[in-house]
Amino acid sequence: MKNIKQLDTQYVANTYKRYPVEIVSGKGSICTDAEGKEYIDMGSGIAVNALGFADEGWMAAVTAQLGQVQHTSNLYYTVPGAELAAELCRRTGLKKVFFGNSGAEANECAIKVARKYAAEKKGADYYHIITLENSFHGRTVTTLAATGQAHYHELFLPLTPGFLHTPANDYEAFVKLASENKVAAIMMECVQGEGGVNALDADFVTRVAAFAKENDILLIFDEVQTGNGRTGELYAYMHYGVTPDVVTTAKGLGGGLPIGACLLSEKTEHVLGYGDHGSTFGGNPVCAAGALHVLSRLDNAMLQDVREKSAYVFRALQGAKGVKSVSGMGLMIGIETERPAAEVVAACMERGVLCLTAKHKVRLLPALNIPQNVLEKAIEIIKSVCAEAPTV
Ligand SMILES: *Cc1c(COP(=O)(O)O)cnc(C)c1O
């Protein structure tokens, strides 16, 4: 550990504040550090390991593809990418998919689609994209501009112009902004993840969707974190009964391999043409094979299971000592604690449970297939840590 910590600190760019834990292996929702200590993983690599560590079916799908073709470039056809796109469309009713390698890239694609769509249909000055305050859409210069949190922007100005931010759940403010500017699209997360695990009000989402449709403003959902079963539906917009024009996703899709996808509707499927966009690694066959397997596992039974486990977590934590509130949807859960969130996370780690934070909250994003008894054990530890007096 000491060596790795030194190496990492010396040679890896200083962008991450790591916990003093070196994870060396994992199985299901349990992982083990270099000292042999076991942890229940309630973060799943920030909603990435949807099926936990070393899932048998997922490993079989990935390794089979590894032995066939690991990469070809997008100059040729390969099986997994085409099948994955077809399956994503079948499960959502959307029409076409562009593959990238991350959430930020999925959003970059959505932004390019929105700009081209609006430029061709309404004029080149209709380039504005509205996003919500407190949102998170990625770290590239353009997705940072989309991110409605000024503290991420400050050191990197000027960012890509054309992004407008409006408060979540304030329909009147949205309408005012959309009416006073030439707008291509509205992009939002149904549950703001990095922003503090806040689900949007159903009323706000349905009214924004209706306004967008009426005014030919594209409705884009950033499902990078909320997607792929995380909230108890395949995609979180499905809880709201709205029809998106573009959906972006990544994180859990590959089950641990990097893949991002931008899903396009009937309205937007033909916006991008030859040469308009691309990615060397996009739709990589190994990542796509992993994603196909993940999707195959996200059937109704699994989604129902996510909803039931969610209900259990909410029941167990709401009103518990030291817990001020519980927010979120499905297995994307925010806990407002009396103790500082960072302190709760550190104490949980000490006691063998890995949790995340989101703003001032403790955030839980366990694997979707976490066994109920493992989940209960983790929640009991989290509860008892929350109940303890602050250390300062
Ligand atoms: C994580 C996240 C992103 C960025 O994804 P990367 O894969 O880190 O580029 C974008 N949007 C949301 C909602 C996210 O949670």
Image (cartoon, rainbow, N blue to C red):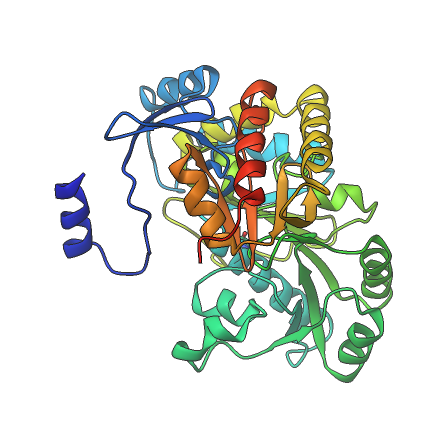
Residue 381 horizontal side relative to residue 66, left or right: right
Residue 65 horizontal side relative to residue 114, left or right: left
Residue 83, quarter of picture: top right
- Depth check, front residue: 139 or 309: 309
* Location of residue 180 with respect to 381 vertically, above or below: below
Residue 332 horizontal side relative to residue 252, left or right: right
Residue 277 lies, in percent from the top left, at 48, 57
The answer to whether any part of residue 24 appears in the image is: yes
- Depth check, front residue: 62 or 67: 62
So how many labels did they put on this image? Answer: 0
Residue 9 lies, in percent from the top left, at 19, 54
Which residue lies at the image location 63% right of the left edge and 43% below the top edge?
Answer: 333
**What quarter of the picture does the C terminus occupy?**
bottom left
Which residue lies at the image location 39% right of the left edge and 42% below the top edge?
Answer: 75
- Depth check, front residue: 18 or 187: 18
Residue 163, quarter of picture: bottom right
Which residue lies at the image location 67% right of the left edge and 28% below the top edge?
Answer: 309
Residue 174 lies, in percent from the top left, at 78, 73
Residue 272 lies, in percent from the top left, at 58, 56
**What quarter of the picture does the N terminus occupy?**
top left
